[in-house]
Image (cartoon, rainbow, N blue to C red):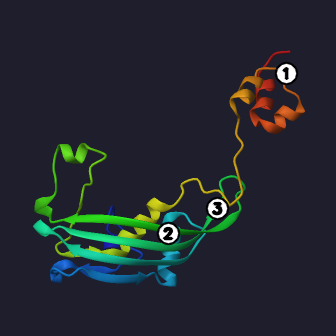
């Protein structure tokens, strides 16, 4: 039975790029990875994007003392998102530098370190393998604006002054500026 068909199991990664850290010695390994069209389409679905036209990353993988592995990288992506104000699709470039630390299972921190949200907690190593593609996909997810707005678009919500006007006899122009002004008038007895 495949991992995807087991109830509760994680689906297979959309952008798998396994790297074996076993062979790392004193010299860091450098890798450049690029997502294929079908991988970009699957990642776009996962990340809620209209499209993912490009995704590449340059990575430097370094073995550290104690069996730890550090991955320094920069990802480049071209994404199409939906503007939360206009609902129009727009294209944006994402460039993100990141660092990730991986630790052998027997060296994972416990207790107070895990409770500290500011602590740099390493990811557990899966034996000696690191999925560089999944790491890049996660970093892209973190780099995306959760409330994307198309260039030049602003959201003009109620300001403090407009909020005070909601309870007054707001005219048509106020209803145009503040959609809640009209609703406030509905709830008032005449």
Give the Cα separation between the discs numbered 2 and 3.
Answer: 19 Å
Residue at 61%, 64% in the rendered image:
81
Instruction: Judge whether 76 appears above or below 152 on screen.
Output: below
> Would residue 10 be found to the left or right of residue 170 on screen?
left
Q: Secondary structure at mark 2?
A: strand
Q: Position of residue 181 (x, y in %)?
A: 78, 30
What is the quadrant of the N terminus in the image?
A: bottom left
Question: Are the residues at dot 1 and dot 3 in contact (C-beta closer than 8 Å)?
Answer: no
- The answer to which of 51 and 97 lies nearer the viewer is 97
Identify the residue position indicated by label 1 in the image: 169
Numbered disc total: 3
Q: Position of residue 57 (x, y in %)?
A: 42, 77
Identify the residue position indicated by label 2 in the image: 95
> Would residue 32 be found to the left or right of residue 90 on screen?
left
Instruction: Judge whether 167 appears above or below 77 on screen.
Output: above
Give the Cα separation between the discs numbered 1 and 3.
Answer: 36 Å
Q: Nearer the viewer, mark 2 or mark 3?
A: 2
Residue at 16%, 57% in the rendered image:
108
- Residue found at the very far top of the displayed protein: 190
Give the Cα separation between the discs numbered 1 and 2.
Answer: 49 Å
- The answer to which of 190 and 90 lies nearer the viewer is 90
């Amino acid at each position: 039975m495949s991992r995807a068909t087991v109830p509760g199991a994680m689906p297979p990664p959309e952008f798998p790029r396994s790297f074996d850290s076993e062979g790392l010695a004193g010299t860091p390994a450098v890798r450049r990875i690029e997502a294929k069209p079908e991988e970009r389409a699957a990642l776009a679905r996962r990340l809620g994007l209209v499209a993912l036209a490009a995704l590449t990353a340059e990575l430097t993988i370094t073995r550290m003392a104690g069996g730890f592995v550090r991955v320094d990288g920069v990802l480049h992506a071209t994404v199409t998102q939906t503007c939360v104000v206009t609902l129009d699709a727009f294209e944006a470039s994402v460039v993100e530098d990141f660092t990730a630390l991986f630790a052998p299972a027997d060296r994972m921190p416990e207790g107070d370190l895990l409770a500290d949200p500011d602590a740099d907690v390493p990811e557990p190593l899966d034996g000696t393998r690191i999925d560089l593609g999944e790491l890049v996909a996660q970093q892209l997810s973190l780099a995306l604006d959760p409330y994307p707005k198309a260039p030049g678009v602003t959201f003009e919500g109620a300001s403090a002054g407009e909020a005070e006007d909601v309870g007054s006899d707001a005219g048509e122009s106020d209803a145009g500026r503040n959609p809640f002004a009209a609703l406030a008038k509905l709830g008032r007895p005449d």
